[in-house]
Image (cartoon, rainbow, N blue to C red):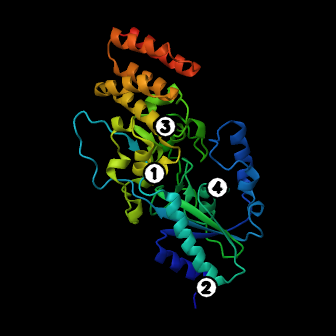
Amino acid sequence: MLSLKEQIIEKSKEIGIDKIGFATAEPFYELEDRLTVQREKGYHSGFEHNDIKDRVYPERIFEEPKSFISIALAYPNKLKNPPERVRGERRGEFARASWGVDYHTILRDKMDQLVAYIQEAAGPQARFKPMVDTGEVVDVAVAQRAGLGFIGRNGLLITEEFGTYVYLGEVLTNLEFEPDEQVPFGCGDCMRCVQACPTGALLGDGRMNAKICLSYQTQTKGYMNEQFRRKMGHVIYGCDICQIACPYNRGIDEHRHPEMEPDPEKVKPKLKPLLTISNREFKDEFGPMSGSWRGKKPLQRNAIIALGNYRDRTALPDLLRCVEEDVRPVIRGTAAWAISKIVTARDEMVVEFLEEALEKETDAETISEFEKAIEEIQSKN
């Protein structure tokens, strides 16, 4: 007769869970100092759970915790049918982890199915707390302890089968299971992800300065710091550079879950239509994706930056319209910046247009953006 753990493993396959592991619910003592130092240095993004002790000590968030059940779902990283390239048509890109239906929804559904099965098998005394990355604990630390993989230099979990292209979730429970064996660190001397990171966000030991990670920067709501704009390229949400650089991801592309399959027109959207998309259109188009969680404004700002990085002259009328008509200062100021990058020679008409627009501005940051844009255009031959 199969043990409960073995039954759960079999059920997980039936549900469509790609990897499952079991770990103790002992405190993550090794994380406390690391997380505290990270916060003191200002390296946390602010999106994490705020209380460090809650992240370290499972007994603070769950009564009598005994075990973690950690799961991983593999997601695709290549488009089967990318949009056809059209001359003069510029597109943005969403990072791979935001393709398809929001992974929080997919993971919660799988974990709810698993918990329902275990509850029936173990009886009413069994209690559970399912979590995705919005929970208190550190997903990669739980997954590493449960033997799903090891934490690489890029801070992501690296699995043998799927590389880093996995979504992680965990269930904290009062049931006790035999823990699985941990996977040893496998990066060796490889520093490719650290060397590839365009902002130097990776510290090389699994930690990162999240504040300067491009993924974080694309999710901020105010002005993007100018030092990150060119480095953002045309990826308007997230960043995959450290994953693309990782040797463990070579040749990996899993298409196991239909709900994760990307719509090419949504994950590589045309940039110019994004500038004027309505709230309703945005919700219909991008609402089911995890990349929509911050709303349309950051994505519109990023689309403007991407057009500036493309130096797309055909976008000038659209950007000038943003300056003249958009009610949001950040959009107007970012459009001024993009215009200054696209204009290749001193253009008095554009300068005059921006100067007239500047007279109406009252926000200090926006005024600065306009002034710098005008100065840059005036300095061109």
Residue that badge 1 annotates: 287
Categorize mark 2 by other alpha carbons within 10 Å: few (<14), some (14-19), many (20+): few
| Inter-mark Cα distance, 4 to 1 | 26 Å
Give the residue drawn at x 39%, y 40%.
277
Residue that badge 3 annotates: 297
Task: Answer with left or right where residue 381 lies relative to residue 174.
Answer: left
Classify mark 3: helix, strand or loop: helix
Task: Answer with left or right where residue 380 lies relative to residue 110.
Answer: left
Categorize mark 4 by other alpha carbons within 10 Å: few (<14), some (14-19), many (20+): many
| Inter-mark Cα distance, 2 to 3 | 51 Å
Whether residue 292 is visible, yes or no, is: yes
Residue that badge 4 annotates: 138
| Numbered tag placed on residue 57 in the rendering | none
Classify mark 1: helix, strand or loop: loop
Q: Is residue 368 above or below residue 116?
A: above
Number of the front mark, 2 or 1: 1
- The quadrant of the rendering that contains the C terminus is top left
| Inter-mark Cα distance, 4 to 3 | 29 Å
Residue that badge 2 annotates: 3
